[in-house]
């Protein structure tokens, strides 16, 4: 995997993580919806209704079958399951499980250091000792971030990941509305129209829909 790809992905993850700060999210989401301004007009992204969830689930199943059955010109399946992707990387000598194991070990090390830091704080240890713990934790967390992003990139093209991205995008299409004459109306009339939208609004809607529905099950 190219180092510059990992670096770019890490920078993007940092931006997203800042945006996903707990306080930021709590202030952003009100009554299961996010209201925002774009080009002087008010928009909102809301959680889907039960009926809309049924439609999303129907589309999810259709997309899943499409991904599973899509073949190239030689008759080979294009998309791989996560299990197949893992095997491909393992055969190439880049085992995802090794990445996961290193990540978990670093998490354990970080937790131990956090406990030591907490103890040092209660005992009013010298600033130099506290800084040492903090610096070690920062190094470990940075490596965890690199490993997490590496795993994400390795599994990005799996059927499961592609399906997850599709669900978030379809929810954004269905639940993004604009305020016209004190009435909330859907922004895009068709999914094709939504897919062909190259404006910033597309990215905003998808990002906010992901925030709202990331913990929801479809």
Image (tube, rainbow, N blue to C red):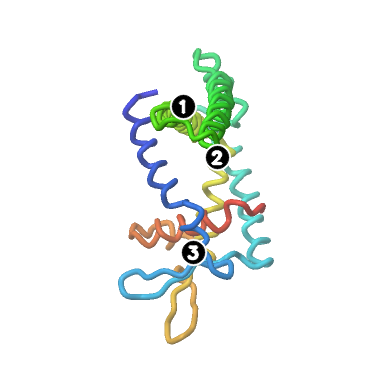
Q: For the residues marked 2 and 1, what is the alpha-carbon distance in whole angstroms?
A: 27 Å
* Quadrant in which the N terminus is drawn: top left
| Residue drawn at x 53%, y 22% as measured from the top left | 99
Q: Earlier in the sequence, mark 3 or mark 1?
A: 3
Residue bearing the label numbered 3: 27
Residue in front for this viewpoint, 182 or 215:
215
What residue do we see at 47% from left, 51% from top? 20
Residue reaching furthest to the bottom? 181
Choose top left, top right, bottom left or bottom right for residue 13.
top left
Q: Residues within 10 Å of mark 1 (few under 14, many from 20)?
A: some
Look at the numbered disc 1 and give the secondary structure of its residue: helix
Q: Taking the image as drawn, is residue 204 in sight?
A: yes
Residue contact between numbered discs 3 and 1, judged by CB atoms under 8 Å: no
**Residue 95 position in % (x across, y down):** 54, 18
Q: Considering only vertical position in the picture, is 43 above or below 102?
A: below
- Disc nearer the start of the sequence (3/2): 3
Q: Which mark is residue 155?
A: none
Disc 3 element: helix
Q: CA distance from mark 3 to mark 1?
A: 30 Å
Residue, x 54% and y 32% (percent of image)?
Answer: 114
Residue underneath mark 1: 140
The Cα atoms of the two marked residues, 3 and 2, are separated by 29 Å
Residue 189 lies, in percent from the top left, at: 47, 70
- Residue 189 makes an appearance in the image: no
Q: Is residue 18 left or right of residue 217?
A: left
Q: Which residue is mark 2?
A: 161
Mark 2 in CB contact with mark 1 (< 8 angstroms)? no
Which is more N-terminal, label 1 or label 2?
A: 1
């Amino acid at each position: 995997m190219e180092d510059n790809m990992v670096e770019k992905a890490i920078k993007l993850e940092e931006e997203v993580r800042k945006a996903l700060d707990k306080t930021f999210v709590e202030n952003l989401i009100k009554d299961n919806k996010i209201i925002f301004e774009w080009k002087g007009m008010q928009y909102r992204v809301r959680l889907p209704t039960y009926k809309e969830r049924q439609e999303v689930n129907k589309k999810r199943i259709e997309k899943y079958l499409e991904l599973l059955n899509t073949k190239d010109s030689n008759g080979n399946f294009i998309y791989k399951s996560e299990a197949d992707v893992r095997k491909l990387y393992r055969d190439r000598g880049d085992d995802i499980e090794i990445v996961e194991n290193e990540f978990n070990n670093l998490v354990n090390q970080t937790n131990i250091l956090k406990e030591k830091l907490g103890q040092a704080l209660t005992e009013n240890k010298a600033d130099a000792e506290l800084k040492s713990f903090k610096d070690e934790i920062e190094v470990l967390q940075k490596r965890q971030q690199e490993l997490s992003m590496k795993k994400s990139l390795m599994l990005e093209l799996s059927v499961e990941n592609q399906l997850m991205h599709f669900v978030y995008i379809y929810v954004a299409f269905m639940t993004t509305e604009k305020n016209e004459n004190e009435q909330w109306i859907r922004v895009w009339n068709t999914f094709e129209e939504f897919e062909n939208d190259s404006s910033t609004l597309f990215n905003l809607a998808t990002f906010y829909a992901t925030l709202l529905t990331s913990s929801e099950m479809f």
